[in-house]
Amino acid sequence: MQTLQSGRFYPMWLAGLLLALMVSAAQAADFKVTDTNGKPHSLSGYKGKWVLVNYWATWCPPCLEEIPDLIALHENKKNNLVVIGVAMDYRNAKQVTDFAEGLLVEYPIVLGTPEIVSQIGPVQGLPTTYLFNPEGKMVAQQVGLITRASVESYIASKPARPKK
């Protein structure tokens, strides 16, 4: 597994590695979530696209700093990428939806729960981001701030999917 900050593999602590292996086995199937507008989203429903899942919170400064880049990634159709934001540590749904609307977030926002976290991957800090390739495999994760450039560079470094 790689981080999104570079193309190099970063060794993890043994406990983190074991946790990641257990989580990736659970993620192999699919995740199914419903956004704040009531629309369902699933990893299998986005087959053929990159899927970036970003855990964030309204009070988290690095989360807020990366939102403009996440909006740009989601809106740039050349990336073939979908962004799903998972709001964590919130008081109520209206707080989250009002906040996202105020920032002009167009990508789907999901209210995070322990069930959702168990489907996607652990929150090791905020923000935490998971990137799934077009075949639905988790290929990168990042704890901390990500940028549009780092995600686009990572995607560009991967070979195009072979035609069958």
Image (spheres, helix red, strand yellow):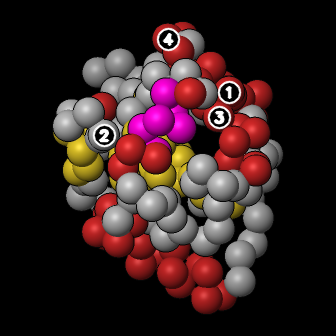
Q: Are marks 3 and 1 in contact (CB under 8 Å)?
A: yes
Dot 3 and dot 4 residues touching (CB under 8 Å):
no
- Identify the residue at horizontal 56%, vertical 13% (top origin): 76
In what element is the residue under mark 3?
A: helix
* Circle 3: residue type: Ile
Residue picked out by circle 3: 67
Can you give x and y, in whole percent of width and height, for residue 131 in the image?
A: 52, 45
Cα distance between the residues tagged 2 and 3: 17 Å
Disc 3 to disc 4, C-alpha distance: 17 Å
Q: Which numbered mark, 1 or 4, is in the foreground of this view?
A: 1
Residue found 65% across the figure and 68% down from its top: 125
Residue beneath disc 1: 68
Disc 2 and disc 1: Cα gap in Å? 19 Å
What residue appears at the point 35 percent right and 72 percent down from the top-left corner?
Answer: 114
In the foreground, 50 or 84: 84
Give me the disc on residue 36: 2
Q: Residues within 10 Å of mark 4 (few under 14, many from 20)?
A: few
First-in-chain label (3 vs 4): 3
* Alpha-carbon span between mark 3 and mark 1: 4 Å
Q: Which of the labelled discs sits on residue 77, or is there none?
A: 4
- Where is the C terminus found, in terms of image quarters? top left
Relative image position of residue 28 (x, y in whole percent) = 31, 60
